[in-house]
Image (tube, rainbow, N blue to C red):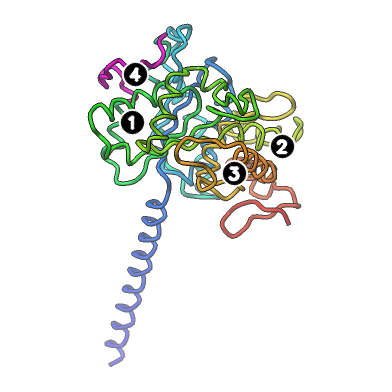
Amino acid sequence: MKNSLLVLLIYQSNMMKRLVTICFMLVVLVANAQKPKVWVISDGGDGINDPDDISAIASYLLMSNLFDTRAIVMASTVHAWNKETSDQGIWASEFFGKAYSSDLPNLKKHIGGYQSDFRFIESSIKGQGNNFDPKEDVNLKDYPSILALYKEVKKSKEIINVLCWGPLTEQALFVKYCLDQNKHNVLSKVRFISHWSSSNYHTGTMENPELTHNCVGDPIACDYMKVQALNGLIKFYECGAIGQFGIVENAQKGSDYYDQFKASHLGKIFAEGKFKKERVDDSDCATYWVLIGDYGVSLDDLAGNGLNMPEVEKRNEEAFASHAELIRHEILRRSNAAAGKVDAIESDYYIAPRGRIERK
């Protein structure tokens, strides 16, 4: 009788362990399924364009456990003087990849949810010298990075969020191909989230909001994307300049603060990528902070038809401004975790239950 009871208890114990394991696996699967899928298109690289994208990629990688990152495309710019530069996908894999690999053990240990590595791709339009031409046919065999995006979207059962950190040439070629081939089912699985390809207040004006660097970089592509969005053929979320004038300009100032980031490999890249005027400039980060949606501005606060109304841009800029210090502290928390310094957060902030930094 005692032996039978012992066997029954052991059986029940083993079953309970199996149930706990299954439940844990289900929680992990659900968590992964809920992560937004992301495809980053950056015009930055090794000595290519404004180095703000270097800081932006580093901060993105520190926040990347919140995303399912499918690829990061580098040097998406047609400027002819970049044509003979080294392969920017290889460079980024070395530069960012090594830093991420070095920080990954502590990130997994203290925070968790980080993917093992990232796919960096050189843009197919790097240095091609020609802006987008809506009259020309698009053959994806001529554009491996765009073909890679097309294949990724086509096989996906979920939305791919394309973060746009520069001119919109690559994105316009992708959209034109899909429209020409009647691939509306592919376009329906894409959301474009763009920073500063329009602004009513900063370089652009209310009369000419398109006079921004990212739009002027390829004005035909920029206009094409906005027209397709207005026609309801694509989803295009325009942030305006809220990353620069909401987050960057209202975040902490001074080298004493940003030197703290240098304890980790990614934090060091973030702090040194573009440190100017006593602050780090990673303004394109706005695209992923609105995707996170917990720091004042979310996708719900942006129009999906490409419009950037003055009152909306101003409201979102102010909302990010009020969260700018918290945003920096969240990146610092993760940088400290990557360096193994899990207690190195200032005492006037605390870690909320969902892992975010909030004021006491």
Which label was assigned to residue 334?
A: 3
Q: Quote the CA–CA distance across marks 1 and 2.
A: 34 Å
Instruction: Using the rendered view, name the quadrant where residue 143 is placed.
Output: top left
Judged left or right of residue 264, residue 218 is left
Q: Position of residue 78 (x, y in %)?
A: 44, 13
In the foreground, 265 or 193: 193
Magenta stretch: give its range: 129-146
Q: Spot the residue most to the bottom.
A: 1
Secondary structure under badge 3?
helix
Q: Amino acid at mark 3?
A: Arg
Q: Quote the CA–CA distance across marks 3 and 1.
A: 29 Å
Q: Amino acid at mark 4?
A: Pro
Q: Amino acid at mark 1?
A: Leu
Seen in the picture, residue 266 relative to 15 is either above or below; the reply is above
Which of discs 3 and 1 lies nearer the camera? The answer is 1
**Mark 1 / mark 4, whichever is N-terminal:** 4
Secondary structure under badge 4?
loop
Majority secondary structure of magenta residues? loop
Which label was assigned to residue 250?
A: 2
Q: Quote the CA–CA distance across marks 3 and 4.
A: 43 Å
Residue to which mark 4 is pinned:
134
Which of discs 3 and 4 lies nearer the camera? The answer is 4
Which label was assigned to residue 149?
A: 1
